[in-house]
Amino acid sequence: MSFTTEAVDRPDVLAEVTACFHAYEAAFMANDLPTLIGFFWQDERLTRYGVADRQLGHAEQAAYRHGVPTPSFTRQLENLRISSFGPDTAVALVEFVRSDSSLRGFQSQTWARMPEGWRIVSAHVSMIPWPPT
């Protein structure tokens, strides 16, 4: 099966992943651990790189989340871009501004449709001085 441009940005996939992305953000800000952890692929191949941390595998991700308190800051999301590639894969990219930092944040998530629903299979978060010099 070859990839075609018709498979890019399918409206049904974009709608599903956009809803998942916003539900993830709400769970993140509320520190709703069952929901938050549930968004990640339950597999040892899961990879998440954070601002000052990393988790390799679902067990590390769950353990990390249990040690992180509810955010004491707010986040303003900007420039959310979600692209889908076929019926079962999507990438979400967003910039964010936190109320407790002058740094600008960048977040990427790769989502895959699993039998149990859409799950994040890899994620990366970084923060840098803004604007860049």
Image (cartoon, helix red, strand yellow):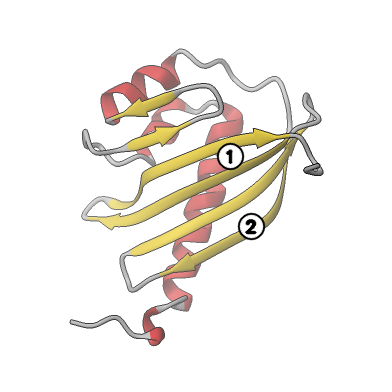
Instruction: Estimate the x, y position of residue 102 in percent, counting from the top left.
Output: 81, 30
Instruction: Estimate the x, y position of residue 4 in percent, counting from the top left.
Output: 34, 85
Q: Quadrant of the N terminus?
A: bottom left
Q: Which residue is mark 2?
A: 80
Q: Quadrant of the C terminus?
A: top right
Find residue 91 and name its label: none
Q: Is residue 132 left or right of residue 92?
A: right
Q: How many marks?
A: 2
- Which kind of residue does numbered mark 2 sit on? Leu
Q: Is residue 6 left or right of residue 50?
A: left
Mark 2 neighbour density, 10 Å: few (under 14) some (14–19) many (20 or more):
some
Circle nearer the viewer, 1 or 2: 2
Secondary structure of the residue carrying numbered label 1: helix
Q: CA distance from mark 1 to mark 2?
A: 15 Å
Instruction: Estimate the x, y position of residue 37 in percent, counting from the top left.
Output: 38, 32
Check the image and report above or below for 19 versus 106: below
Task: Residue 126: name its quadrant.
Answer: top right
Check the image and report above or below for 124 versus 20: above
- Which kind of residue does numbered mark 1 sit on? Ala
Q: Which residue is mark 1?
A: 26
Instruction: Estimate the x, y position of residue 14 in percent, counting from the top left.
Output: 48, 68
Q: In this view of the protein, which residue sits in the foreground, 130 or 30? A: 130
Q: Is residue 126 left or right of residue 113?
A: right
**Residue under the image location 78 percent in, 43 percent down:** 132
| Residue located farthest toward the front when viewing the structure as drawn | 133
